[in-house]
Image: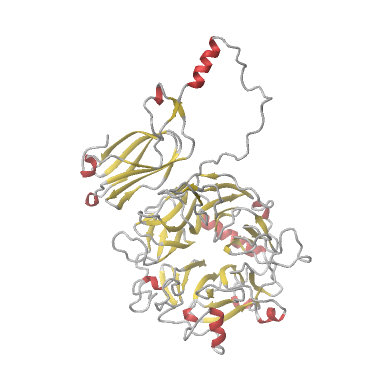
Amino acid sequence: MSFTRAVTLAALSLALAVPGLASAPHAAAAGATWSGLEQPVPPGSSRESSWPVGLGKIGDIEFWAPNRGLLITEGEPPTIPAGLWAYNGVAWHELATVCGATDGRIAWAGPSEFWTVSNGRAGQANELSGNGIEKAVPIEDNTLCHFSGGQLIASYAHPANQPDSYQAMHAAECLSPVDCWFAGDPLPEPQVGSFHLHWNGSSLENEPYLGEGHAVEDMRALENHLYESVRIARTDRIAGASTTPVIHRINPEGVLPAIQPEEGLFDEGLPLYQAGETADALDFLHLSVADGELWAAAGRSSERVEVAGQVTVARDVKRTWTQLIGPEHPLGPILPTDPSEERALLGLVGAEEAKDAAVSAIAAEPGTGEAWLALAPREGSGSDARAVLVHVSAEGTVLEEQTLPSTSEEEQGIGPKGAAAKLACPAVNDCWLATTRGWLFHLAPDGERSLPTDSGESEYFTGVITFRPPDLGLPQVPPDAPPPDNSGLVEEAPNYGGTFAEAQAARATESKVTLPLLSHLHSRLVHGSTLELSFHLAVKARVRLVAKRRSDVVAATPMRTLGAGNRKLLLALSPRRWPTKLSLQTHALAPLPSVPSASGEGAGVTTVSTGLFVLPHTQLLSGSGSLP
């Protein structure tokens, strides 16, 4: 059974099991209202004895089913630690006090398996500056945590300031448990491209999208493909001409090319921009999927406030895009009777209107052909901000506007809880909003705010997770504390002197050297334009072959994880853009072995090659011959 089919059956089974979820007509539950009275209370407290509190900045909120959801937060110390919370249909509860993030993401891989984009651990990868002073390296949103069966089974990170270092990630999604993608900031200079990681079920590989250095900001699965949106900025590094593809499509595992721009997406059929505007007039497109349809929404660019970009909403049905709100169909006032309140809510100035606001999220509501759009001030929001939502039909009609807390909640003494930040709609008449202050609002029919408790909750929640295992891909840090006292243990035979003792002493003083990671490099051209590079790895390592023509990358293999032993890489080269330099990027995943220096493998070994190995300039680079 395919993954998509399994999701469909799971959703159908839940709809039949949970009263109200199977009702198709949206108008049948017209009594659905937004409420902020379902906020979690601090861990260890009861709702009767403790006031709810904000959870801190919530980076993402995602659902596998209406009564199985997750959110990731940076926390609100000391009350709320950075970590994850889970929803079981009745209430939110703490899931993990580790793997939180400044602006994290969640990717469900199965009913009891998911990944998070998380912060690194401070102090684990500090390094020395040029003057010998220790400096901190970036840790925000640049590591991954893998959860399965209620446990945190793995953590992934990478040393900083290397060509293949993990960059901050803003998007994550899975097509199946063995096909997950994570993407974010552009590659560090002088490389050109956007950073991507791919989980293939056994290893996590660097698979950058080369040629266009746009930051990837969102990612959603639809019909066995992933769609990702990018932020266009004037400072982005581009190799050659760019058609400004603001959405890319990622193919399933095994289908090449892995990532490709959506051809013809923003031509005459979908006018995202006004006449004369450039692509960076809009912020990135927030994405949402429901009922086989992809929704996208963006507001004016936060980096170029001088341009006239405006709130834009588009919808893709069977690979055909339609603009619902934008230059040809502008968003009108959301509070026509009180323009001053509208300007105050959205931080507008002068003659600005709602169409000039920022878009912070969009969530398509299943079974309705409609979506909720979250608007926010362009310059952030203070503690007195309120959330602003707009309900949009498939034709672009504004069905209703909503400010939260609602009027009735304000009458109950509930004050502003921050601007709208994240949205998710797991079912019809069932949506969740997270604000910038970490407060949750829930759309549900009155009297139906609780669902049957998730009977499979034990599959992903077996208690609060407080331990994060060592990061795979990072050198293990020696412990600060001294080793345990084992002086009373018999570890070796006592030395009684004599010939045996002399031989033992000689071995103890014999010098050793560390074997190089790379050795026995050979190459040849196959079929005239394919480079075959063979080599020996001393230990398991990540390896990538890059071909450059002066400073431009003209070809590269994906970053691959290879075991110790004799290995080879194949790289297709273009005769029209023949490289002038070949580099082999490597990173050892295990300690390099040491051997006696006087004889055997250690004879003549003086250096350790790991990191960036530039292959010699030979006749191969001019089109013939082979590397030594």
The part of the image, by quadrant, that contains residue 97 is bottom right
Left or right placement of residue 297 versus residue 31 in this view: left
The total of numbered circles placed on residues is 0
Q: Which is nearer the eye, 419 or 569?
A: 419
Left or right placement of residue 82 versus residue 557 in this view: right
| Coordinates of residue 237 in the picture (x, y in percent) | 35, 60
Q: Quarter of the image containing the C terminus?
A: top left
Left or right placement of residue 498 versus residue 548 in this view: right
| Coordinates of residue 62 in the picture (x, y in percent) | 58, 62
Residue 23 shows in the view: yes
The residue furthest top is 498
| Coordinates of residue 12 in the picture (x, y in percent) | 60, 62
| Coordinates of residue 609 in the picture (x, y in percent) | 39, 37
Residue 366 shows in the view: no
The residue furthest front is 131
Colouring chosen for the image of the structure = secondary structure
Residue in the image at 69% along x and 78% along y: 409
The residue furthest bottom is 337
Q: Which is nearer the eye, 233 or 11?
A: 233
Left or right placement of residue 381 versus residue 613 in this view: right
